[in-house]
Amino acid sequence: MTDSDLFSRGRGCSRRWCVCLVLAVLFVSLGAAAGIYFAYQFLGLELPHERVFRGMFRVRSGDRWTSQLSDHTNPSYITTAQQYATRLDTIYGNSVFKNVFIRSEVLGLDRGANDSLVVHFNLHINYRRLHLDAADLYLVIMSEIRRPDASALTGVSIDEDSVEIQERTPSLEILPPHLDDNFPNLKAAPIAGHEVTPSRNHLTTSTPPPTTTLPPRRCQALDVTLCANLHHNVTTYPNLLGHPDARTVERDIISVREVIDSECHPLAQEFLCELLQPDCRRAQSMNPSGVFEDHIISPCRDFCEEVMSTCGRRLPPHLRLAIDCASFPVLDGG
């Protein structure tokens, strides 16, 4: 085959060569498009123009808190959460920002004062089409609350003073670097005979209370619904975040769910649940004090460091400080 078979002086290339080039470009383009599509559909990547605003409000009348709403799998919880998501969709879907509103989601239902119902939610906004901030979204819902004929809020009354909306900050901006200095590693700089207490303004010290003997650790059934799918079915308290019981765990569930929903790491839920509901092993022998005490099982250090590297700054300071990856065991052979 000569050069004249591949290239024509008049046209620049042969028909066969041009067809092959066009097909190659077409297949590469289709492959790239398919890769982007599957990345967003199956890896849960957030579109760069989507912004998420976190909000909450307290229901003054019409709905009340019940114990069933503490279980995210309970039909009562599911129904109530869907109802409030629909109310929010109606409010913002019919507002002046309807063209940029994507969807709402209810993160959790909490117990307020006098058994009132507190609703925690997210609002997803298309930021590419219009630049708005939390104040704009706040005015929309406040306008609806104050309307006497608001169809989206039929049957319920919202406490105006309880409404809060703020943009969810990217993980690397949750706390500026200078604020991290106010929350040091307490184990790295102990003060002899005193307990160090973190504060955003300064460090304070206090004399520890008299030492008391804790009861022996005991294994028990899992009791946090968010962690019902763990590979183990028993846990123990205090857990690895310092919660003494399930009731105190519930106080932090909303914060934990927000970290999980942020998709900062694909295994964030598994890791956080291993801290909230750590595995437990029954005692086979007595400890040096002559007591049978069950054993708490920690996640491995590498797993902790990997998840904390991407999710750590999304955690509230009191939870972030409670997680000490260096104290967790190293995986054998790692």
Image (tube, helix red, strand yellow):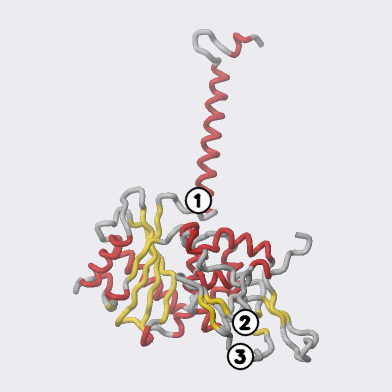
* Label 1 residue SS: helix
Estimate the x, y position of residue 186 in percent, counting from the top left: 59, 72
Viewer-nearest of discs 2 and 1:
2
Q: Mark number for residue 193?
A: 2
How far apart are the two marked residues, 2 and 3, measured between alpha carbons?
A: 12 Å
| Residue drawn where x is 48% and y is 73% of the image | 199
Q: Reading the chain from its start, which is encountered first: label 2 or label 1?
A: 1
| Residue drawn where x is 57% and y is 64% of the image | 268
Vertical placement of residue 8 versus 273, above or below:
above
* Label 2 residue SS: loop
* Label 3 residue SS: loop
Q: Reading the chain from its start, which is encountered first: label 2 or label 3?
A: 2
Quadrant for residue 88, please give it: bottom left
Vertical placement of residue 123 versus 61, above or below:
above
Quadrant for residue 230, please give it: bottom right
Estimate the x, y position of residue 149 in percent, counting from the top left: 19, 72
View extreme (front): residue: 192
Estimate the x, y position of residue 48 in percent, counting from the top left: 44, 50
Mark 3 residue type: Pro
Mark 2 residue type: Gly
How far apart are the two marked residues, 1 and 3, measured between alpha carbons?
A: 55 Å
Label 3 Cα neighbours within 10 Å, binned few <14 / some 14-19 / many ≥20: few
Query: Can you identify the residue that label 3 sits on?
Result: 210
Estimate the x, y position of residue 50 in percent, counting from the top left: 40, 53
Comparing 125 with 54, the one in front is: 54
How far apart are the two marked residues, 2 and 1, measured between alpha carbons?
A: 53 Å
Q: Mark number for residue 40?
A: 1
Total tally of numbered discs in the picture = 3
